[in-house]
Image (cartoon, rainbow, N blue to C red):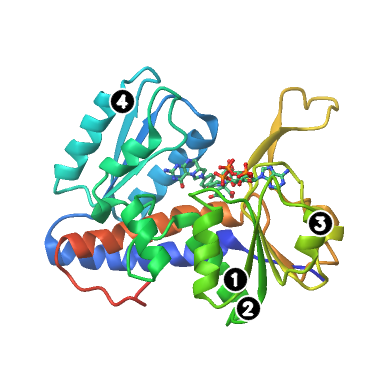
Amino acid sequence: MTDLIDGKAFAEGLRSRVGELAAAFTAQTGRKAGLAVVLVGEDPASQVYVRNKGKQTVACGMASFEHKLPAETSEADLLAVVEALNADPLVDGILVQLPLPAHIDEQKVIATINPDKDVDGFHVVNAGRLAVGLPGFVPCTPLGCVMLLKDRLGSLSGLDAVVIGRSNIVGKPMAQLLIAESCTVTVAHSRTKNLAEVVRRADIVVAAVGRAEMVKGDWIKPGATVIDVGINRVPVPASAGSEGKTRLVGDVDFASCQGIAGAITPVPGGVGPMTIAVLLRNTLVAAHRNSGLALAPDAI
Ligand SMILES: NC(=O)C1=CN([C@@H]2O[C@H](COP(=O)(O)OP(=O)(O)OC[C@H]3O[C@@H](n4cnc5c(N)ncnc54)[C@H](OP(=O)(O)O)[C@@H]3O)[C@@H](O)[C@H]2O)C=CC1
Ligand SMILES: Nc1nc(=O)c2c([nH]1)NC[C@@H]1CN(c3ccc(C(=O)N[C@@H](CCC(=O)O)C(=O)O)cc3)C=[N+]21
């Protein structure tokens, strides 16, 4: 039997702990922890994310500041918005939605965010801290994946992990976190030879590819734990009344993994909700640090 890893339920629990600590923060400081989200243009994936995030930030007792800028916004204007947020004492965390329009240099924008407000963990300072094992902000999606893995498996020590994807926001930090958990980590990507065979060695498979249902059940070692990071919107197969409708699927072919994987995250309801819950957690950690308040490392 393949167990379902209920990211939605786990994320709800995480958000309720964040909510309690956010209320305590407000009682102590007389203000709410604040998260600013900057969205440039109308990328559909980012819009899904912003919609869920805004609601959940407020539901956790934190302040949400949304800055929606037109797609034609210049790089200089965006950098000025980020600098204003860096200087704003009510803003603890800053998230600039990626991808940005092609005329804006993403690295330049990320480099402008104060690393102490970089709740996405994308700034080179935080990437470097993660690489050398210093405390800092860790990217939300991979951290959420590790939380689910540890909840399911306990210690990850000595397990073989294959991460498919090597992006700066998911694949690379995911590999760093799994190394820190003492997994033996393989990072696969578009040039990997015999991908199915590589994946078949893994006790843990993390798919972050951006290709709908690419990873098949017969690539999975029986009993392996499968974490599907993919968020792909695909058309519903043609039938009466379904014209123009879409649904979300992951990078893993969920149906063919049934009866083979030991456990698997669904899409939706798996990693996506964890990303937002960890973002709120990181914002609360930032609020404490930026106010000089202590927060036990294992408090959330
Ligand atoms: N659930 C969540 O909260 C989040 C979900 N996502 C989703 O996760 C997925 C990955 O996102 P992201 O890392 O930003 O994507 P990127 O497009 O930045 O990276 C994709 C990676 O997959 C690799 N890849 C592409 N095609 C293949 C292939 N055929 N075989 C093996 N590897 C391949 C690429 O290799 P190469 O480097 O060689 O090009 C690249 O390293 C997407 O579906 C995205 O929507 C992203 C962020 C958050
Ligand atoms: N700076 C930055 N940081 C990000 O973390 C970031 C980003 N930019 N750009 C876009 C991607 C994508 N991403 C998602 C997070 C949650 C869901 C999510 O909540 N998904 C729900 C489904 C939502 C629905 O029903 O449509 C789920 O999987 O259950 C989706 C997508 C974060 N990203």
Q: Position of residue 278 (x, y in %)?
A: 43, 59
Q: Amino acid at mark 1?
A: Leu
Residue 147 seen by the camera: no
The residue tagged 4 is 75
How crowded pointer 3 is (Cα within 10 Å; few <14, some 14-19, many 20+) is rated as some
Q: Which mark is residue 149?
A: 1
- Residue beneath disc 3: 196
**Do the residues bearing badges 2 and 1 touch, measured as CB atoms within 8 Å?**
yes
Residue 145's x, y, as percent? 55, 63
Pointers 2 and 4 in contact (CB under 8 A)?
A: no
Dot placed on the residue nearer the N-terminal end, 3 or 1: 1
Q: Secondary structure at mark 4?
A: helix
Residue underneath mark 2: 153
Secondary structure of residue under mark 3: helix
Q: Answer above or below: position of 276 versus 107.
A: below
Badge count: 4
Residue at 65% x, 46% y is 209
Q: Secondary structure at mark 2?
A: helix
Which mark is first along the chain, 4 or 2?
A: 4
Residue appearing at x 34%, y 50% in the figure: 123
